[in-house]
Image (cartoon, grey):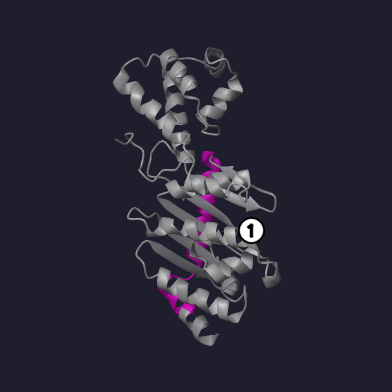
């Protein structure tokens, strides 16, 4: 039996965030401070903060003690929360790639699995969820075929596995806006790019996938860098903005940050060609290769 309010496809990261939010609400209802709650579980205020933000794994003993502290005694109310704590500690399918994944990206894969809507703006590459295997291999090897080894192949395998999220019955809606330069950049060579354009045409024919292209004359004005917005069906989860850089990534969820990136996404969507015109441009570029 599932936990009420938690989608079956939600990964451990999302479950931690949902449970953390519910524990915060229970603490506030009990009119207790984070430091008081931390003392009750032999921890600190900062530990309670990390728990409520879903930033750490849960010890079932801690959740049990907190529920008691917050006055949640009824087994029918306690058990779903304890079950959620147990589920939140189960590793996701991507756990076997932990030796390849930096910690900051491990969280992203879990959130991507749980999202109901993914909006992404990309300046350099075809979005990862839409890449072909050959294109992903060229990206992972930094354009050096001689550098392809077992590690590169596992990175490609991880990317291909991530794409299965779009084939689920409850697949998220993907809305991608890409700069036109992405479609001219010969990642992997001419044939790889041509095959990539063909796959983009196939994928964007699906009802839950939308692609818009920003033409050259408008590129560079609507937003300063690539980013992704992850939205969730669960009301407990905030919209997450993911901004990756060379050595890490930012996860932004404050209201003012989400609103700023939401406005930027609106601008790039208005600036870009419509989905139909974008498909026509894709077909034209494919024919020219």
Q: Position of residue 66 (x, y in %)?
A: 46, 18
Q: Examine the rendering and report whether any part of residue 259 can be seen.
A: no
Residue under the point 55% across and 23% down: 48
Q: Is residue 281 left or right of residue 43?
A: left
Residue in the picture at 38% in, 46% down: 9
Residue at which label 1 appears: 151
Measured from the top left, where is residue 226 in percent x and y? 59, 58
Percent of width and height locating residue 227 = 57, 54
Residue 205 position (above or below residue 173) = below
Q: Is residue 276 magenta?
A: yes
Which image quadrant is residue 79 in? top left
Q: Which residues are magenta?
A: 254-282
Dot 1 lies on which element? helix
Number of other residues with Cα within 10 Å of mark 1, as a class: few under 14, some 14 to 19, many 20 or more: some
Please name whichever residue, 59 or 252, is drawn nearer the observer in this view of the structure.
Answer: 59
Q: Is residue 166 visible?
A: yes
Q: Is residue 63 left or right of residue 152?
A: left
């Amino acid at each position: 039996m599932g936990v009420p309010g938690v989608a079956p496809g939600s990964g451990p990261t999302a479950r931690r965030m949902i449970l953390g939010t519910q524990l915060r609400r229970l603490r506030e209802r009990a009119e207790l401070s984070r430091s008081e709650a931390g003392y009750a579980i032999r921890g600190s205020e900062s530990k309670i903060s990390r728990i409520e933000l879903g930033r750490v794994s849960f010890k079932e003993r801690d959740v049990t003690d907190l529920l008691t502290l917050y006055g949640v005694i009824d087994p029918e109310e306690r058990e779903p929360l304890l079950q959620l704590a147990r589920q939140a500690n189960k590793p996701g399918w991507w756990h076997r790639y932990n030796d390849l994944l930096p910690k900051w990206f491990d969280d992203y894969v879990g959130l991507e699995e749980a999202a109901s809507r993914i909006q992404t703006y990309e300046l350099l590459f075809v979005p990862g969820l839409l890449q072909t295997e050959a294109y992903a291999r060229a990206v992972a090897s930094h354009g050096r075929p001689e550098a392809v080894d077992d590690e590169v192949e596992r990175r490609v395998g991880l990317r291909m596995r991530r794409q299965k999220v779009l084939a689920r019955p409850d697949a998220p809606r993907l809305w991608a806006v890409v700069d036109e330069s992405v479609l001219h950049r010969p990642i992997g060579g001419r044939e790889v790019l041509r095959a990539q354009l063909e796959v983009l045409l196939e994928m964007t024919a699906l009802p839950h996938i939308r692609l818009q292209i920003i033409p050259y004359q408008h590129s560079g004005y609507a937003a300063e860098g690539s980013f992704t917005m992850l939205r969730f069906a669960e009301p407990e989860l905030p919209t997450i903005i993911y901004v990756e850089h060379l050595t890490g990534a930012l996860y932004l969820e404050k209201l003012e940050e989400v609103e700023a990136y939401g406005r930027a996404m609106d601008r790039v969507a208005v600036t870009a060609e419509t989905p139909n015109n974008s498909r026509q441009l894709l077909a034209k570029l494919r024919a020219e290769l």
